[in-house]
Image (spheres, rainbow, N blue to C red):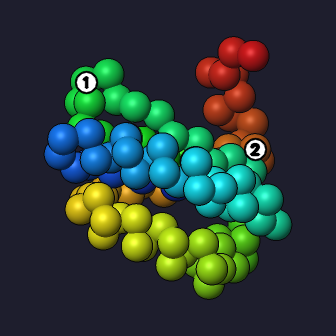
Amino acid sequence: MAITVNLRYTGTGGSARAFAEEMTSSGTVEKIRAEEGNLRYEYYVSLDDPETVLLIDSWADQAAIDAHHTSPMMATIAALREKYDLHMTVERFMSIEENDADRRFIRK
């Protein structure tokens, strides 16, 4: 069952967006996407709050997340969070692949 984590990075003066841009330009995002079990790693800018960037981060399972958390990319991410003085909120979701009752609400 896939696990998706939504991380909202909030800063001031465009720092959250600068963080996401540096994550991308430094190659860190591509390295994370290449990690075993990574299904999605994408940044989005909020229309309601330009000082917030949303990261949608999906993994095949908890073991993949655990491996990511011990990878060298975590030190890079932590350093950039500090550099840009970001604050975070986190939400975690499980996929509904196994739940046929919810399928009737999903339009493809």
Hey, what amino acid is under mark 1? Asp
The residue to which callout 1 is attached is: 48
Q: Residue 33: percent from the left, percent from the top?
A: 73, 55
Q: Residue 28: percent from the left, percent from the top?
A: 62, 60
Which type of secondary structure does the marked residue at label 1 adopt? loop
In this picture, is 34 found above or below 12? below
Q: CA distance from mark 2 to mark 1?
A: 31 Å
Residue 43 in sight from this viewpoint: yes
User: Residue placed at 66% from the left, 22% from the top?
Assistant: 106
User: Residue placed at 68% from the left, 61% from the top?
Assistant: 32
> Residue 31 is drawn in which quadrant?
bottom right
Residue 6 in sight from this viewpoint: no
The count of marks equals 2
Foreground residue among 86 and 55? 86
Q: Is residue 21 left or right of residue 32?
A: left
Q: Is residue 46 left or right of residue 62?
A: left
The residue to which callout 2 is attached is: 97
